[in-house]
Amino acid sequence: MKIAVLRETRAGESRVAASPETVKKFAALGASVSIERGAGEGANYLDHVFSEAGATISGTLAETISGADLIIGVRAPAADSMNRFQRGQKIVAIVSPHSNGDVLQAAAGAGVDLFAMDLMPRITRAQSMDVLSSQSNLAGYKAVIDAAAYYGRAIPMMMTAAGTIAPAKMFIMGAGVAGLQAIATARRLGGVVSATDVRWAAKEQVESLGASFVTVDEEAMKGAETSGGYAKEMSADFQRRQAEFVGKHIAKQNIVVTTALIPGRPAPRLVTEEMVRSMAPGSVIVDLAVEQGGNVALSRRGEVIDVGGVIIIGFENVPGRLATDASSLYAKNLFNFVAAFFDKEKKEFVVDENDDIIKGVALTRAGAIIHPNFIPAPIAGEGATHG
């Protein structure tokens, strides 16, 4: 079985879908690995390192994917490039299917079987395959480091002969994987950390990391989590009261990091322009949700802006700012997924259509979109009979 590793073409994407470690592990399973030349450069995995691990370095995309049974990437290929792949080939990548319907349509049209790593179900068996968690963990850490870099003062309390420097007040909005790592990192740097989330379960997690938990209505929070562990969208009344409460809290903060996302929906607006302008000059806000519309008013995707002395950071692909580690973790997620469905006797990737993991991540098969959440709605009147 041949596994092909794509070189990423999206601007700013520095990660790669394989590491020297996973190349060796794929070889141990009995698979050969072909890597497009230069695929790992952004993550400091040079071609010779992959070659030494046992991979074949291919000069072009066509050469890389020729005869490949399984193709792995960080981002799914663009819709207009799907026709370069052969019918029946399987592609595994981060797809973001809610916003990339054209990619699904193109994959189905090309007869490609497309699997979305970002739809991995949150069940025990799939924990080692959960790319959202592995990448969000790094994003939460990097968000605090970026904030500290732009913050023109010290983070921890410092007692000197010349006087005492007060610690930075740091507020983390959203206590999922990214938020909890942001809290832990902010605490390590010596900040006075507070956090909020709509999920009741987050309160204990936040406090276990040494941060204080702030919310306007604990009772409303208790039903604010889906069975999959994601946050639900709260009522308009809760959002209004929480916004008023949080607004007063934000005005006292030096650094704010927002991490709130709702799967398949635009990111909820948590920080208004009025809240931004209430902060003291020199304060910093990091919007980790900027690629999904942003939690912060005025934040701009891919930019760092100054609003009355308040710095708003809207970096894209924050995990990719730690490309080596992000690639290493993502590659392990991918390997664990492939290995779970690898027939060692036949030496091939075997898709079990009845498996809960496959049901969760499979988007297209045999020329059709098969995931129930993304099957196109029938056109009005289609299939109707007339008499």
Image: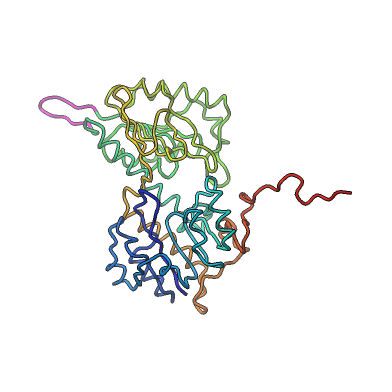
Q: For this rendering, which residue is in front, 47 or 166?
A: 47
Identity of the residue drawn at 40% across and 39% down: 288
Q: Which image quadrant for residue 324?
A: bottom left
Question: What is the x, y in percent for residue 114?
Answer: 54, 59
Question: What is the x, y in percent for residue 191?
Answer: 28, 34
Q: For this rendering, which residue is in front, 278 or 73?
A: 73
Identity of the residue drawn at 24% across and 33% down: 155
Identity of the residue drawn at 44% across and 35% down: 294
The colour scheme is rainbow
Q: Is residue 71 above or below residue 267?
A: below
Q: Which image quadrant for residue 109?
A: bottom right
Count of number-bearing discs: 0
Q: Residue furthest right?
A: 387
Q: Main secondary structure of the magenta part?
A: strand
Q: Is residue 218 above or below residue 358?
A: above
Question: What is the x, y in percent for residue 316?
Answer: 38, 42
Q: Is residue 184 above or below residue 374?
A: above
Q: Which residues are magenta?
A: 157-166
Q: Is 57 covered by the magenta stretch?
A: no
Question: What is the x, y in percent for residue 163?
Answer: 14, 24
Q: Which image quadrant for residue 301?
A: top left
